[in-house]
Image: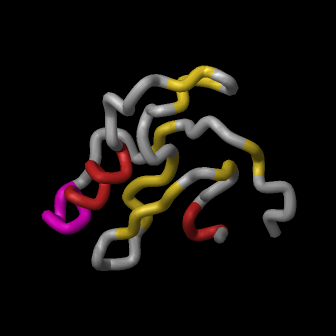
């Protein structure tokens, strides 16, 4: 869990082939804020991170804040 830097659920982490964390954060922007949902996501951060990792590229944003609940028992 510490390697992923996850602090909120749902939050995702993507590692490159060398095991380096290249992205952590939201999956997409479906949830704008608590109680505010879009009809459909307009950005897809997880898909972009997976695509970058498989192509051996880096991302311009290594983290994007997620909307959700904090994971309370992180240690």
Residue at figure coordinates x 38%, y 32% from the top left: 41
Q: Which of 52 and 58 is in front in this view?
A: 52
Q: Residue furthest right?
A: 73
Q: Residue furthest bottom?
A: 18
Q: Report if residue 27 lies within the magenta region.
A: no
Residue at figure coordinates x 75%, y 44% from the top left: 69
Q: Residue furthest front?
A: 39
Provide residue 40's location: percent of width, then percent of height.
Answer: 38, 30
Image quarter in which the C terminus is found: bottom right
Left or right: residue 74 compared with residue 57: right
User: Which stretch appears magenta?
Assistant: 52-57
Provide residue 34's location: percent of width, then percent of height.
Answer: 68, 26
Q: Report if residue 56 lies within the magenta region.
A: yes
Residue at figure coordinates x 60%, y 21% from the top left: 36
Q: Please determine whether, in this image, residue 66 is positioned above or below residue 72.
A: above
Residue at figure coordinates x 29%, y 52% from the top left: 47
Q: In which quarter of the image is residue 2?
A: bottom right
Q: Main SS type for the magenta part?
A: helix
Q: Please determine whether, in this image, residue 47 is positioned above or below residue 15.
A: above
Left or right: residue 56 compared with residue 74: left
Provide residue 45's location: percent of width, then percent of height.
Answer: 36, 44
Image quarter in which the N terminus is found: bottom right
Provide residue 70's location: percent of width, then percent of height.
Answer: 76, 47
Q: How is the image coloured?
A: secondary structure
Left or right: residue 10 compared with residue 75: left
Q: Quadrant of residue 15?
A: bottom left
């Amino acid at each position: 869990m510490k390697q992923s830097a996850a602090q909120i659920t749902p939050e995702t982490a993507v590692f490159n082939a060398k095991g380096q964390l290249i992205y952590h954060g939201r999956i997409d922007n479906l949830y704008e804020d608590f109680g505010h949902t879009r009809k459909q996501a307009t950005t897809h951060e997880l898909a972009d991170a997976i695509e970058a990792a498989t192509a051996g590229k880096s991302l311009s944003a290594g983290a994007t804040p997620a909307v959700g609940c904090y994971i309370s028992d992180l240690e």
